[in-house]
Amino acid sequence: MASRNGSYTTSDLSRKSGDIIAEALRHPVTITQRSKPRLVILNIDDYQRLMKGADARAVGTVDTMSDALFSDIERAVDQYAEDDEVGR
């Protein structure tokens, strides 16, 4: 049985999938397992809205950085160090 916040157990998911899907078309539904939230089912419009607002930046390292970018950063650090020395 659903709670007020649209939460079902994994057992409910196997028994009431049609009802859960119908509810998820209206608003996100949480699926719990052992009383802990484990999944969220949401309609495609909500999903696309979330993905559109997601941060698309990628994490990188010095090893994956282009040589040109590394050189630019090196120059900026050197310039900052020089400016800091002059300012003292």
Image (cartoon, rainbow, N blue to C red):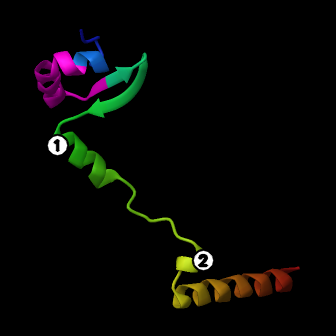
Question: Percent x, y for residue 45?
Answer: 17, 43
Say what amino acid the circle numbered 1 marks.
Asp
Tell me, yes or no, if residue 27 can be seen here.
yes
| Mark number, residue 45 | 1
| Mark number, residue 62 | 2
N-term-proximal mark, 2 vs 1 = 1
Q: Nearer the viewer, residue 55 or 31?
A: 31
At a point 77% along the width and 84% down the height, the residue shown is 83
Q: How crowded is mark 2: few (under 14 residues within 10 Å), some or many (20 or more)?
A: few
Question: Percent x, y for residue 65?
Answer: 53, 80
Q: What element carries label 2?
A: helix
Q: Nearer the viewer, residue 32 or 85?
A: 32
| Mark number, residue 56 | none
Q: Quadrant of residue 55?
A: bottom left
At a point 43% along the width and 64% down the height, the residue shown is 57
Residue closest to the far right: 88
Q: In the drawing, does residue 45 fall left or right of residue 71?
A: left
Which residues fall within the magenta stretch? 13-30
Tell me, yes or no, if residue 9 can be seen here.
no
Say what amino acid the circle numbered 2 marks.
Val
Marks 2 and 1, how far apart in space?
A: 37 Å
Question: Percent x, y for residue 14?
Answer: 21, 21
- Looking at the image, is 7 positioned above or below residue 62? above
In the rendered image, the quadrant that contains the C terminus is bottom right
Question: Percent x, y for residue 58?
Answer: 45, 65
Indicate whether residue 25 is drawn in magenta.
yes
- Looking at the image, is 51 positioned above or below residue 12? below
At a point 28% along the width and 12% down the height, the residue shown is 4
Q: Nearer the viewer, residue 22 or 85?
A: 22
Indicate whether residue 69 is drawn in magenta.
no
Q: Quadrant of residue 42?
A: top left
Q: Main secondary structure of the magenta part?
A: helix
